[in-house]
Image (cartoon, grey):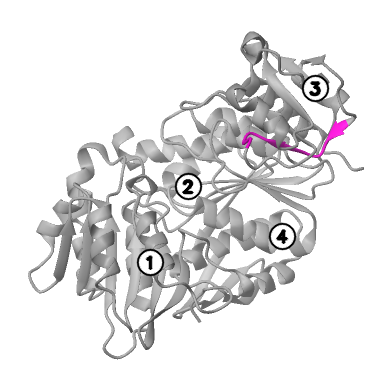
Amino acid sequence: MSFLWTVSDLMAAMHGRPMGNLPEGITGISIDSRSIAKGEAFFAIKGDRVDGHDYAGIAIANGAALLVVSEAKLPALGRLTAPMIVVDDVLEAMVRLGCAARDRSAAKIIAVTGSVGKTTTKEMLRHVLSPSGRVHASVASFNNHWGVPLTLSRMPENTDFGIFEIGMNHVDEIRPLVNMVRPHVAIITTIAAAHLGNFKDLGEIASAKAEIMEGLVDDGHVILNRDNEQFDTLEKAATALGVAHVHSFGSSAKADFRMVEFAGGAEGAVLWAAIGGRTLEIQLGAPGRHIAENALAAIGAAALVGADVDAAVAALATLQPEKGRGARYRLPIGSGSFVLIDESYNANPASMRAAIALLKDTELPEGGRRIAILGDMLEMGEFAGRVHAELAVPLVEADIRDVWLAGPEMAHLRDALPEDVHVEYRETVDELKQFALGSIAAGDVVMIKSSKGTGCGRIVAALLEKYPPSSGTGHAE
């Protein structure tokens, strides 16, 4: 059997001690007792809301090969008889294991951060690097103090390319994570007003994102967005840190990975890019200029880590938007259908504008409506009222005539929209959900966008339940 870790290596890396009859090795690592697979180790991490030690028995019942538990929690486990590795602190043990995984790996490592597009770019990299070797990447948005070491710990020794998403909403959050990951290439997708309530201005956000460059290996590379107004700040930070190679992407004539031309479509796009002395025609399976911009960074990174660039370009044609991040569904209603664009995973002013542009560019059948269903953008702090009201400008410029809103902050947008826009406002997401379920008609194109914490994903789920996709994939054609 092929093990992710032998138990001897596991104990050595984590400074743990054995209890019970331990297996020879484990096939995987889980922190969720419900989804653990047979042969995996269950790490009983104590989170903000739940303590994994409380679910140790369930993990064993569901097939866990062994438990990793805290010394201090042993008395609370009572008479549970199971193979265990006992450590001082489970999360700290996972950090040590993650560092050991990085130490033993010969993979080329890419780390991604940015205010918008981290997860999309990470998934794009997974997609374009797969033809060139074995790829290991974080699942979902595992980009924080437990997600990064968990992803590292799960990285097989024979990985060719490791891709890590690194997030933050405060200063000093990226630094310890990137020092674990130690990337060969770091990408900063863009700097925008995300988590603005925790920062003074965009310059502070840029400085916090620049921490990703501190973990680069010697002779490492950073890829920066040349079109972003914080480019100069980031470039200066790279120089101050002694980063060996600074590259840029964007439409600027000075960009190393340059967008020569972009032709957007309803379900995809074509991008012409100048990379490495060549002009490449790139078919994109997902629509939106922001997707094309991230594709430049992904292809640039693929070139820097020695992947097959032509194979990477070809792979982009089959790229599909993810659930909550632009996934499209054509749903039957009455004798026709409507298109649902699910952008409900997260939102800030920049990604809101990108989603509005996506709605504008989506083909509209005769008699249909372009409907923007928008929920609050969270973590905007004292800027909340202003940034919500300012969304009126891109909505009007995109000629979106139907805007349905939910949440206390979206009241600012309601008040800022002109009278000729049909606005439906509800205080809560569930009230708007009920309205939407009874108000969408054949021919409509509906885009739902909000911060995840608002719960607008419940509107998406309700629409998919009431109008189940008729095609195999459910994606719009």
The disc at residue 83 is 3
Residue nearer the viewer, 39 or 389: 39
Separation (CA) of disc 4 from disc 1: 35 Å
Query: Magenta region: which residues?
Result: 25-33
Mark 2 is surrounded, within 10 Å at the Cα level, by few (under 14), some (14 to 19) or many (20 or more) other residues, namely many
Does 113 appear above or below 318? above
Q: x and y percent of residue 340 in the render? A: 40, 71
**Contact between labelled residues 3 and 4, with CB atoms less than 8 Å apart:** no
The quadrant of the image that shows the N terminus is: top right
Residue at figure coordinates x 36%, y 44% from the top left: 453
Separation (CA) of disc 2 from disc 4: 20 Å
Separation (CA) of disc 1 from disc 2: 31 Å
- Give the mark nearest the N terminus, 1 or 2: 2
Disc 1 designates what residue? 463
Disc 4 designates what residue? 129
Q: x and y percent of residue 144 in the render? A: 53, 35
Mark 1 is surrounded, within 10 Å at the Cα level, by few (under 14), some (14 to 19) or many (20 or more) other residues, namely some
Q: x and y percent of residue 322 in the render? A: 53, 61
- Give the mark nearest the N terminus, 3 or 1: 3
Disc 2 designates what residue? 114
